[in-house]
Amino acid sequence: MTRAERRMKPALPVAGGLPGRHQTWDETRRRIYMGIVIVGLLVQVTIWTLNLLRPHPDPVTLFSNPLFFAMSSWNLYWLYTRRPIEVVYLVALVVCGLVILARAVVTPLIGGPAMLTSLEDLYWLLVIVSIVSFLMLDYRRAIVVTAAFYGMGALLPWAMLALSGVSFAQAARLGQVQLLCAITLATLCSLSWYREHFVLERRAFELTHRMANTDALTGLHNRHALYPLLDALLERVEGGHPAALLLIDIDHFKGINDRLGHNVGDEVLREVARSLPRHLREDDIVGRWGGEEFLVALVGISADDAVAVAERLRRAVGSRDAPPEQQVTISVGVAPVIAGERLQACVSRADDALYAAKARGRNRVELSEVKAERNEETLLTPELFQDGEPAPA
């Protein structure tokens, strides 16, 4: 097996976690809840004021809304001072449970012509509590809370109406409202269950996809992910678009591992991996080819421009802001992609150019091209770059 064929063998799966930015979800969630609480305060004041303007103010609303207002004000203070969010859940559920209990028991006992209308307010509250539960809790606990609150809010009024001697015909409207509320809550629970499972499955798929296509150490494409991208690149070349491959190797990398240890070596790999994309275009492809080697595919670019890009990358890596013992250089082999050429042949030419760069002293760029008239792979070195200047003959 030739050296180029060994390089073309698929890479083995890489274990380990995936790099990524830390997500400040708790802070975002805190801000969302603070916004909800502020809106709730305004709504409570409005409802309490409108209730006072009614000919017969609802007594439960008259006393429960100030309780809600006090709870919401405390919640806002608690969230603003960055206390544990879980306490807000508990307090909100306890207060809502007390208000639902009070309305379910007190309203039927008071009776009167507005009794059924006042009871209808209870089921709006149940819907709101259910929505808040799904926002604040995981879907399983939210479904349990929703079912418990609905059971209390649906059964207690009928028990109190029966004790008051109210006939079923008189309270038929209450049954209709309860059924509508049950349908609404069941829909919320179903949507939450579906969303939770859909999100979990999607996250699992995305994680699997990322693990299969991302190099765990550098966060770049791994070789498995590069193959389909490079195949698409070859198709574009067939369509008349120029392209080039750069095969990059970190010079004397084994010495870094031997002197400083593999942890420092891993950090050098990550730094180089972060440096390369900064000096490439958005459409360019960059990935870890294996070990200390990286592969870059340049789209719509001539051989001369590809050499210029390779020089830019070489200088960027060499001028990294890093401790002296972690300073490294790279050697680059450049191979223009030829229409009708197989990927293995193109990578082999880039590999040969890289080998020539390392044989000629490293920290340089070498260009490999194909002589069209002979259709033979030949290494052309009209210009040998050393620190950006042609090397002496």
Image (cartoon, helix red, strand yellow):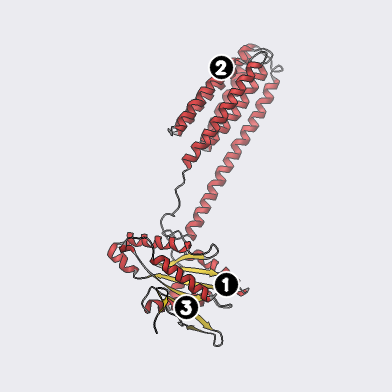
Q: Distance from label 2 to label 3 (Cα)? A: 83 Å
- Image marks 2 and 3: residues in contact by CB distance under 8 Å: no
Say which quarter of the image contains residue 314.
Answer: bottom left
Q: Earlier in the sequence, mark 2 or mark 3?
A: 2
Can residue 336 be seen here? no
Residue visible at 65% across and 11% down in the picture: 165
Q: What secondary structure is found at the residue carrying circle 3?
A: strand
Per the image, label 1 sits on a secondary structure element best described as helix
Count every numbered label the image shows and give the total. Answer: 3
Residue 264 shows in the view = yes
**Pointers 1 and 3 in contact (C-beta within 8 Å):** no
Q: Which residue is mark 1?
A: 234
Q: Tell me if label 1 and label 2 are in contact, CB under 8 Å.
A: no
Picture residue at 57% right of the left edge, 28% below the top: 40
Residue hosting label 2: 63
Identity of the residue furthest to the left in this view: 259
Of 368 and 182, the residue lying toward us: 368
Query: Dot 3 corresponds to which residue?
Result: 367
Q: Amino acid at mark 1?
A: Leu
Is residue 168 found left or right of 3 in the rendered image?
Answer: right
On residue 250, which mark appears? Answer: none
In the rendered structure, which amino acid carries the disc numbered 3? Answer: Leu
Residue positioned 49% across, 60% down in the render: 213
Q: Quadrant of the C terminus?
A: bottom left
Kind of residue indicated by mark 2: Phe
C-alpha separation, residue under disc 1 versus residue under disc 2: 74 Å
Q: Is residue 238 left or right of residue 207?
A: right
